[in-house]
Amino acid sequence: MSYRKPKVLVTRKLPDIIETRMMELFDCALNLDDRAMSKDELIAAAAETDVLVPTVTDRIDRDVIAAAGERLKLIASFGTGVDHIDFPSAKKRGIMVTNTPDVLTEDTADMTMALLLAVPRRLVEGERLVRSGAWTGWSPTGMLGHRIWGKRLGIIGMGRIGTAVARRARGFGVSIHYHNRNRVAPETEEALEATYWSSLDQMIAHMDIISVNCPHTPATFHLLNGRRLALMKPHAYVVNTSRGEVIDEDALVKALTQGRIGGVGLDVFENEPKINPKLLKAENAVLLPHMGSATIEGRVAMGEKVIINIKTFVDGHNPPDRVIETMF
Ligand code: 8YV
């Protein structure tokens, strides 16, 4: 039987080594210019492909899935979060969805830790001061921030990334607290000396730093809303490397600009790449361009996962990173 290579559409430029391998294995349409595709382009492309490889910048909504016709069988997303894909619509049409978990856990936890240090210690403000030429030298009261040693970190979402953040933060003398849909295994709690809070409100009210590490799902949309932000201690910080939508960004900006919280470290935003202008002006906000998993090693490993997911699927097996309903 002759083997027809599956037609695979990759929506963004991937690392060269991944694109080369994909070209060998599949009938691949690449995006060498790395220009984000419009909805119309996605709709047109989805109708003519067996496998779609989107990223967080592509909205694979109901319209795109409806336009896909009979041909599209797999959406092999490049990334762990799948909130850009209308999963129920895909499921209804029998389209499988896969993602790339695990391989970006440590990198994202590193970036969370970087923000967790940068905000209380005013790292970026200090850097701006030096570069501006306005630094007049050391002073006993210059650039005072807050110590993180001995403080309480509240992790919202104790999955892979949340756990990896907890492991790191312990090394900095921070006590670990968490809220999660399900309590983690007693061995994990014990190893991390982690305290479980069944009430998110209660946890928020007692923490010095809040780290958002849960996925964005219908259940976590605006989980950190105005009411919950008002529960925070006035000196406490918020760090988010998950998805902007988990926080009500308008409410966060209000809390920050009215001095009701100490500062924020954000790698993700509600309307990426648009940033609330008030955030841009806030000295106590460290803002990053969604780069939590942006390491060469991580992005290659994510690409390898995409290839394995596609290959196992077209060979008639169950892909290792199949997204299932219970994840939402
Ligand atoms: C990825 C991410 O870079 O994997 C995720 O969920 O947020 C990022 O680290 C991005 O999603 C790639 O599509």
Image (cartoon, rainbow, N blue to C red):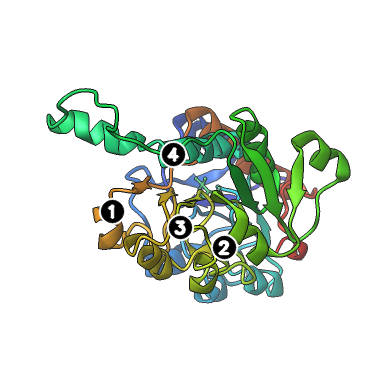
Q: Gap between marks 3 and 4, in whole Å?
A: 13 Å
Nearest to viewer (mark 4 / mark 2): 4
Label 2: element kind: loop
Mark 4 and mark 1: span between their CA atoms?
17 Å
Mark closer to the observer (4, 1): 4
Query: Does residue 122 show up?
Result: yes
Task: Answer with the quarter of the image where residue 308 lies.
Answer: top right
Mark closest to the chain's N terminus, 4 or 1? 4
In space, the residues marked 1 and 2 are separated at their CA atoms by 28 Å
Q: Could you tell me which quadrant the C terminus lies in?
A: bottom right
Instruction: Report the amino acid beneath label 3.
Output: Pro
Do the CB atoms of the residues marked 4 and 2 lie less than 8 Å apart? Answer: no
**Is disc 4 placed on a helix, strand or loop?**
loop
Q: Decide: marks 3, 4 in contact (CB < 8 A)?
A: no
Q: Nearer the viewer, mark 1 or mark 2?
A: 1
Looking at the image, is mark 1 or mark 3 earlier in the sequence?
Answer: 3
On screen, residue 220 versus residue 54, left or right, reads right
Measuring from the top left, give residue 280's x and y in whole percent.
26, 54
Residue furthest out toward the front? 140
Mark linked to residue 282: 1
| Number of other residues with Cα within 10 Å of mark 3, as a class: few under 14, some 14 to 19, many 20 or more | some
**Mark 2 or mark 3: which comes first in sequence?**
2
The residue tagged 2 is: 83
- At a point 70% along the width and 70% down the height, the residue shown is 91
What type is the residue that disc 1 sits on? Ala
